[in-house]
């Protein structure tokens, strides 16, 4: 971008930073379309050693962009079913932190505190 790189963003939702605060999203829209090749509503289908594939929102066909570096930032999901495997290991069982919902250290500490308070 500003360092002389050609940058493309491939996003499966119809907005960038859709789950961030409104002010952050506005700030991004001020700059991103100016500097980046932006593809919205375009789920990534595959990453090869030289390209990134995505589903074109209009035709539904798979298209490819050439890429020498790929930053894969697709978010996280809780592995709740993995945690459930421990449910009957003890009389009391609490799911805390990221196994409930991918979140942050504050949430991990808060849910751990709540669980500890019930033991
Ligand atoms: C790249 C990245 C950056 C982040 N940056 C921040 C940040 O700046 N600030 C912030 O607040 N949060 C940040 N987070 C989120 C934060 O790291 C998590 O929300 C937090 O670590 C969740 O804590 P947890 O104890 O629930 O899970 P974890 O920290 O994931 O701990 C779970 C542990 O259980 C172990 N485990 C899993 N299965 C088993 C098993 N069967 N037996 C034994 N052990 C097992 C795992 O190896 C792991 O060590 C970041 C997350 C990532 C991925």
Image (cartoon, helix red, strand yellow):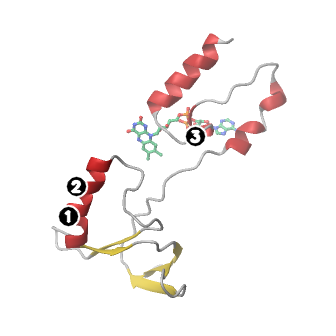
Say if 99 sits above or below 106 in the image: below
On the image, the x and y values in percent for residue 78 come to 61, 45
Q: Which quadrant does the C terminus fall into? A: top right
Reading the image, the residue beneath label 1 is 31
On the image, the x and y values in percent for residue 51 come to 44, 81
The answer to whether residue 113 is left or right of residue 30 is right
Q: Residue at x 77, y 33 (%)?
A: 86
Reading the image, the residue beneath label 2 is 27
Say if 40 sits above or below 51 in the image: above
On the image, the x and y values in percent for residue 77 come to 58, 49
Between 58 and 102, which is closer to the camera in this rendering?
58
Reading the image, the residue beneath label 3 is 101
The answer to whether residue 96 is left or right of residue 106 is right
Is the residue under label 1 in contact with that under label 2 (CB below 8 Å)?
A: yes
Picture quadrant where residue 65 is located: bottom left
Quote the CA–CA distance across marks 3 and 1: 31 Å
Say if 16 sits above or below 84 in the image: below
How many neighbours does mark 3 have within 10 angstroms: few (below 14), some (14-19), or many (20 or more)? some
Quote the CA–CA distance across marks 2 and 1: 7 Å
The answer to whether residue 27 is left or right of residue 56 is left
On the image, the x and y values in percent for residue 25 come to 30, 54
Kind of element beneath mark 2: helix
Picture quadrant where residue 106 is located: top left
């Amino acid at each position: 971008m500003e360092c002389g790189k050609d940058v493309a963003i491939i996003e499966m939702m119809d907005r960038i930073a859709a789950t961030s605060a409104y002010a952050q999203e506005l700030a991004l829209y001020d700059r991103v379309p100016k500097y980046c090749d932006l593809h919205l509503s375009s789920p990534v289908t595959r990453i090869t050693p030289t390209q990134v594939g995505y589903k074109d929102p209009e035709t539904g066909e798979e298209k490819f962009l050439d890429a020498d570096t790929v930053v894969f930032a697709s978010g996280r999901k809780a592995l709740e079913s993995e945690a459930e495997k421990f449910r009957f290991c003890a009389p009391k069982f609490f799911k805390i932190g990221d196994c409930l919902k991918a979140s942050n250290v504050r949430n991990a500490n808060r849910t751990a505190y709540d669980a500890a308070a019930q033991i």
